[in-house]
Image (cartoon, rainbow, N blue to C red):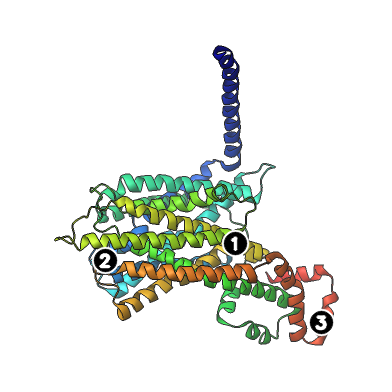
Amino acid sequence: MVIISTSVWLPCLNSFIHSLIRRLKEYYRRQKEYYFIYKHRLLFAVVLAFSRALTNYAIINVLAWYFTDHGEDLVVSSIMSNIHGSLSSVLVVLMANAADSYVGRFYTILFSNTAYIGGLMLLLMFNPYDVKWLVVILLVLLALGTSGDKLLQEVLTDLVNDLDKSEAQTKERSIARAEIWPRIAKVVAAICAMLFVSQIGWGIQILICIVFMTICLIIFCTGHNSYHQGQLTERPVGVFFRVLHMGIKELLIKRKSWDYAGKITTIQWVMSLLRMFPMWEVFLVVYLISATGSTFFFEQYNNLNTNNQIAVQIYGLIKDVSSFAIPFLYPWICGLRKNNEKVKVGVGMLCGIVSCVFAWQLEVQRLKRVNNLDDKNANTSLSFLWLVPQFCVIGGMEGLTGEGLLNFYKSQMKEETLHSYGEEYIEFVTGFGTFLNIILILIFKSRLGWFGNTVNESRLDKYYLHLVFVGLVNFIIYCLFARFYYKDADRHQDLMNDDLINQRLDELLPCDNREQDNQPLANDEQVQENQL
């Protein structure tokens, strides 16, 4: 019986294995055809992406740790790192507007990389950083450099669109093919930063980054004739700032000289952006936690047992891998068939709270062991691996909330001009969240004395516990917004575009302008195209 049963199931198992291998090969072939495209014209942008990723992993991700390692106290190092992050996020909007409206993406990236190299040179040449105006210039130059990453992604998308002439070409496929190359560049740059660059002194690290960025920028310039952006179009940055600084009544009442079609378009933009403001306000706490992870999380590396073999840069890699992997695995982990972006954002917020809990508990244990040391600079018995969970979870927070908010924003914006500008607007809000971290640090230092000159003289455990409670309150507020204010996004958006705008126009416009409602739709579209 055993021989007979073996003769039955063994061929079946063999057939199953061959079938599985064949299906995996077919799946790999389809994925390769969908995601992968290679032409020599892509290389001039890919090498630049590699140099920027190398600098990001080696220097920028650990900027707070770098300043602390060069004699600055904990508060000053964190504030300088947060100033850079806030400026970088705000400048993303301005750089994108300049690239799309005035000088083009190629020259904007050229300017961004030149500023990047200039900032690194100041970082290398002037140490200690006791000249405050020089530090400000340094941070602004570095922020101008890091704010150009999104533009390089759009350059690769334009190149892929030019190279892919197949009938199966779609916008989503071009974006996917363009995104694969920066990811490959980031993986290679991360490996180089971990294995080679981070094992040497700070000065040599910065010098290597300067040399690589200069060489790659020269290669990028050689591709000028290979890149064609197309006609420049004005994007609605001005609308965002008007909505941010003025009320909608002032915007509508004082602009009496607009034509009717122009009023419709502007009111649609304003109402769409205003609807996103409650969500962006809730996200300020998310970006506050993210800014804390970029500064104080790295400071906890002090006194951990690393065996002198693990560089602090590894945690930036762990966070980036987590921010990509967790959103990718999220549908399978949660078992959700319907992709509900509001649930995804909520899960991301919970990840941020959990990361603060991990950081709080680690800091309690770390301070307890440091206080028992005679030499406060010596390593404790705590392993560097205890930092890994909080970086993994905060990476998941950034990935889930970033992807969820972007998709939710696109679902709210029916206007194509606003629809394509979501990442830049989100980055702008990120800058305010990072700036909020600076304000809290200064308040807690002056009022409560939680921050000293070093991490061992500070009470980061209390600060993390404070963030846990703030995150919980913010999560409850988000749930209320998601449940009641955004309960039916699509229906509310349609009503806003039709009934609400028409009602507002009836209240604000003269009677003689209302007769233009009966004009053909083609006339309105032609006027809007002429304005754009």
Classify residue 394 by image quadrant: bottom left
Crowd rating for badge 2 (residues with CA inside 10 Å; few <14, some 14–19, many 20+): many
Query: In this orientation, does residue 282 appear?
Result: yes
Judged from the image, the secondary structure of the residue bearing numbered disc 3 is helix
In depth, the one of 421 and 221 nearer the eye is 421
Disc 1 marks a residue whose amino acid type is: Lys
Against 440, residue 382 (above or below) is above
Taking the spot 29% from the left edge, 53% from the top edge, the residue there is 205
Disc 2 marks a residue whose amino acid type is: Val
Disc 3 marks a residue whose amino acid type is: Arg
Disc 2 from disc 1: Cα separation: 37 Å
Taking the spot 70% from the left edge, 68% from the top edge, the residue there is 493
Marker disc for residue 514: 3
Residue wearing tag 1: 342
Crowd rating for badge 1 (residues with CA inside 10 Å; few <14, some 14–19, many 20+): many
- The numbered mark, 3 or 2, whose residue comes first in the sequence reads 2
Marker disc for residue 455: 2
Q: Could you tell me if the residues under marks 2 and 1 are in contact, i.e. CB atoms within 8 Å?
A: no
Among all residues in the image, which is located at the extreme front?
1
Residue 501 x %, y %: 73, 77
Disc 3 from disc 2: Cα separation: 65 Å
